[in-house]
Amino acid sequence: MKARPFAIALAGISLALATSAPADPADPAAQEVRVPIHLRNHKVEVPVTLEDSTRLRVVLDSGMAFEGLLLYDSARLDSSLRLRAGRARVGGGGSGEPSTALVVDSASFSVGGERFTGRLIALENSPLRSVSDDGVCGYSLFAQHVVELDYDRMELVLHAPGSFRPDSGWASVPLSFRENRIPWLDLEAGVRAGDSLSLACYVDLASSETVEFLTRDGMRFRLPDSLTDVLLGRGLSGDIRGSRGRIPWVRLGPFRVDDLVAAFTPAAVRSRQPGADAVVGNGLLGRFHCAFDYAAGRLYLRPSATPPR
């Protein structure tokens, strides 16, 4: 194994690696790929095949800003991948030290027959090995497709570039991108009765919370009167502790959601994103039929017929 230690900050990797070839617009069958998904604890699990052999189930993660895969357990790598691997330390959410990992600079994987190439990161001795899924993927899919999440049919739909044509039933929410390819949007919220704030948020589909408000000195919102301390989850750098409580409402585009449970998390533990007031999770987005169009800078929404699970 190559002794090539280096450091990686998960949410800030920028790679220029090849991804799947664009679909032929003259071929109607190439305009979209439908992939069955599973929703577990408000997280979208997608079937993935690594290097044409290892079958995985990974979480779709808009907070994963590099092309490739992150696996929670290096034991999933076969001997050929291990021979190509170097070592790294990978930082992320949590209050502990970064995780160690095996890293393959270029590995192939497929989703619904669509082939991608990117960096493969496989964690060593991570507490995330105990979770039910195998890892996460994100930017590889979002970079080359409009990614539609249909929770009524439990399908992920990959639309070829330029082929997605939203009709009048969709609402359009602007997305912006900062240095690290993570989608940001503005969210209106009443965190306490009488409040109405416009907050800068980024979207993290791998979060099962509705909204995670990031607490710090100088934060722009006031905490609710009643909060319960909880373990919110685990990140790459350990446990993420915070609290939950009810808030009056949030508004995403034209859609207002009333009386919902939100999380409150120390920004220093939860987020590596400067300037973020909150994180929008799939506990909120899962109430909608969603389509992410990174190229157009748009998130398309319409209410889902299926209640949140």
Image (cartoon, helix red, strand yellow):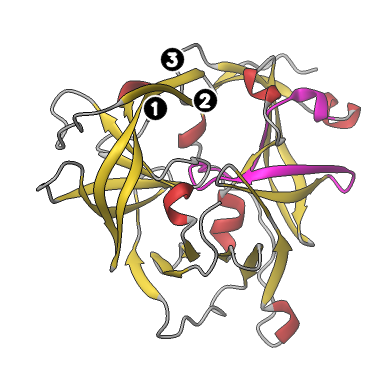
Q: Of residues 14 and 262, which is closer to you in this image? A: 262
Vertical relation: 60 (above or below) 93: below
The CA distance from mark 3 to mark 2 is 9 Å
Q: Is mark 2 in CB contact (under 8 Å) with mark 1?
A: yes
Question: Earlier along the polypeptide chain: callout 2 or callout 1?
Answer: 2
Q: Which image quadrant: the N terminus? A: top right
Vertical relation: 251 (above or below) 135: below
Label at residue 95:
3
Q: Secondary structure at mark 3?
A: loop
Measured as percent of width and height from the top left, residue 23 is found at: 68, 74
Location of residue 157 by image quarter: bottom right
Q: Residue at x 39, y 66 (%)?
A: 298
Q: Is residue 148 left or right of residue 197?
A: right
Amino acid identity at mark 2: Gly
Give the residues in magenta: 51-77
Label at residue 270:
1
Vertical relation: 119 (above or below) 83: below
Label at residue 295:
none
Q: Is residue 207 left or right of residue 159?
A: left
Q: Secondary structure at mark 2?
A: strand
Q: Residue at x 81, y 23 (%)?
A: 75
Location of residue 77 by image quarter: top right
The CA distance from mark 1 to mark 3 is 8 Å
Amino acid identity at mark 3: Ser
The residue wearing badge 2 is: 235
Q: Of residues 171 and 84, which is closer to you in this image? A: 171
Q: Secondary structure at mark 1?
A: helix
Location of residue 230 by image quarter: top left
Amino acid identity at mark 1: Arg
Q: Is residue 300 left or right of residue 44?
A: left
Measured as percent of width and height from the top left, residue 138 is found at: 58, 48
